[in-house]
Image: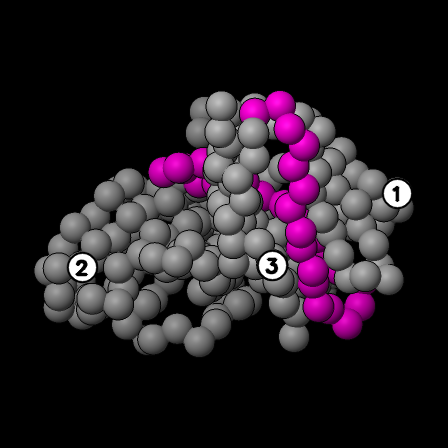
């Protein structure tokens, strides 16, 4: 009965590869988010979708493309991975003012 | 633009002692304020939040926080810490229009026996 789930939990890949991270929420929320947590644990928002529409798009390289097939899912696709993309990526969802976070996906680019 | 400052990078506290984590925010209007906790290898869990009303808010795990508009602060407190409180604590601010969270850099809490 996990509220916000992400797969995979760990992802190790080579530079230049393309990878996706999936996020699903079963809370019935309208809005979903992607955050990046760097090696210094600093958290920064990347994207937000509301009812499958992009509403927040921070300064993120266009190699990162979010996709929301329905309200319950927000996937993150990353093209041409770079060393600097190594981080923990968190998905979150909300209905209004409070966001609930998934467990995170640790991406390591070699 | 909204921002959050957590002045303390790392705090060490003895088990059973009190804990206070500082948070200062910058936001032009009335902010929405949050404290999240991240245990090692885990996601973020909401401890408490403030939107309006009583400036002293109670959260889970025995935590409370006080909103002081005059000081632009939202400090987190716990009267008696447990070893399981060792974690990373994040203060965050959001606007009332888009709920976009801006996080502080976090404070690492170590609990010694």
Q: Magenta stretch?
A: B15-43
Residue in the picture at 73% in, 36% down: B64
Have a look at marks 3 and 2 and say if they share a chain: no
Q: Is residue A58 above or below residue B58?
A: below
Residue situated in front as seen by the camera: A99 or B4? B4
Gap in Å between the C-alphas at discs 2 and 1? Answer: 46 Å
Figure quadrant of the N terminus of chain A: top left
Instruction: Determine whether label 3 and label 1 are within 8 Å by CB.
Output: no
Is residue A30 toward the left or the right of residue A35 in the image?
right
Q: Residue at x 76, y 47 (%)?
A: B50
**Mark 2, secondary structure of its residue:** strand
> In the drawing, does residue B31 fall left or right of residue B8?
right
Return the x and y of residue B92 as percentages of the image width and height: 62, 55
Q: In which quarter of the image is residue B77?
A: top right
Within 10 Å of the Cα at label 2, are there few (<14), some (14-19), or many (20+) other Cα atoms? Answer: some
Q: Where is residue B76 in the image (x, y as percent from the top left)?
A: 69, 43
Residue B105: mark in rendering: none
Residue B2 picture quarter: bottom right
Q: Numbered disc 3: what chain? A: B
Is B38 included in the stretch rendered in magenta?
Answer: yes
Q: From the image, tell me which residue sits under label 3.
A: B7
Residue at label 1? B54
């Amino acid at each position: 009965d996990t509220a916000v789930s992400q797969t995979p939990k760990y992802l190790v890949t080579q530079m230049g590869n393309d990878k996706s991270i999936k996020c699903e929420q079963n809370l019935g929320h309208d809005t979903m988010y992607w955050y990046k947590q760097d090696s210094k644990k600093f958290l920064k928002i990347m994207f937000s979708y509301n009812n499958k529409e992009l509403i927040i798009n921070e300064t993120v390289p266009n190699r990162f493309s979010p996709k929301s097939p329905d309200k319950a899912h927000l996937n993150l696709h990353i093209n041409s991975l770079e060393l600097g993309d190594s981080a923990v990526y968190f998905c979150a969802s909300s209905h209004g003012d409070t966001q609930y976070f998934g467990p995170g996906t640790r991406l390591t680019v070699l | 633009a909204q921002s959050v400052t957590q002045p303390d990078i790392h705090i060490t506290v003895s088990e059973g002692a009190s804990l206070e984590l500082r948070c200062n925010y910058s936001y032009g209007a009335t902010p929405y304020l949050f404290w999240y906790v991240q245990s090692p290898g885990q996601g973020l869990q909401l401890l408490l939040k403030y939107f309006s009303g009583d400036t002293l808010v109670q959260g889970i795990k025995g935590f409370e926080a006080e909103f002081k508009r005059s000081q632009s602060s939202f400090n987190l407190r716990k009267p008696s810490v447990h070893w399981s409180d060792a974690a990373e604590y994040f203060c965050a601010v959001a606007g009332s229009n888009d709920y976009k969270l801006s996080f502080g850099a976090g404070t690492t809490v170590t609990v010694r026996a």
